Image (cartoon, rainbow, N blue to C red):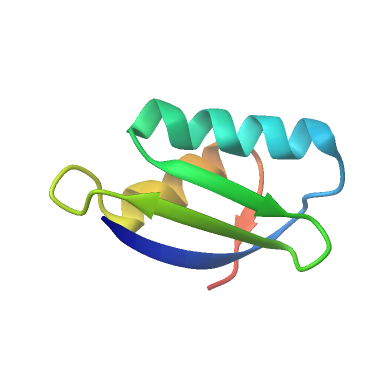
Amino acid sequence: MSSVILKVDGMSCNHCVSAIEKAMRELGAEGSVNLTAKEVTVQYDDSKVTVNAIKEAIEEQGYDVVQ
């Protein structure tokens, strides 16, 4: 398993947390959102999903990945 911490703008509430964590699960990854730090820590299998795919999934939810 690999992990990455992404800076994400636009998150402000529990709905944001739920949307991002659901998007990660749909990719087969596990995301943990820190609203205070504006970060998403993602655990994923790099043989099945790429960091770019993770970023795209977050952006499709309406958030901006700044890292």
The N terminus: image quadrant: bottom left
Q: Is residue 54 above or below residue 51?
A: above
Return the x and y of residue 16 as percentages of the image width and height: 75, 38
- The residue at 44%/30% (across/down) is 25
- The residue at 43%/65% (across/down) is 4
Return the x and y of residue 41 as percentages of the image width and height: 54, 59
Return the x and y of residue 36 as percentages of the image width and height: 83, 63
What is the residue that sits farthest to the bottom in this orientation? Answer: 67
Q: Is residue 14 left or right of residue 44?
A: right
- The residue at 23%/48% (across/down) is 45
Location of residue 15 (image quadrant): top right
Q: Is residue 10 above or below residue 14?
A: below
Q: Is residue 6 above or below residue 55?
A: below
Q: Is residue 25 left or right of residue 35?
A: left
- The residue at 77%/53% (across/down) is 10
What is the residue that sits farthest to the left in this orientation? Answer: 47
Q: Is residue 54 left or right of residue 39?
A: left
Total number of numbered discs in the rendering: 0
Along the viewing direction, whichever of 52 and 40 lies nearer the viewer: 40
- Observer able to see residue 7: yes
- Observer able to see residue 61: no
Return the x and y of residue 14 as percentages of the image width and height: 82, 35
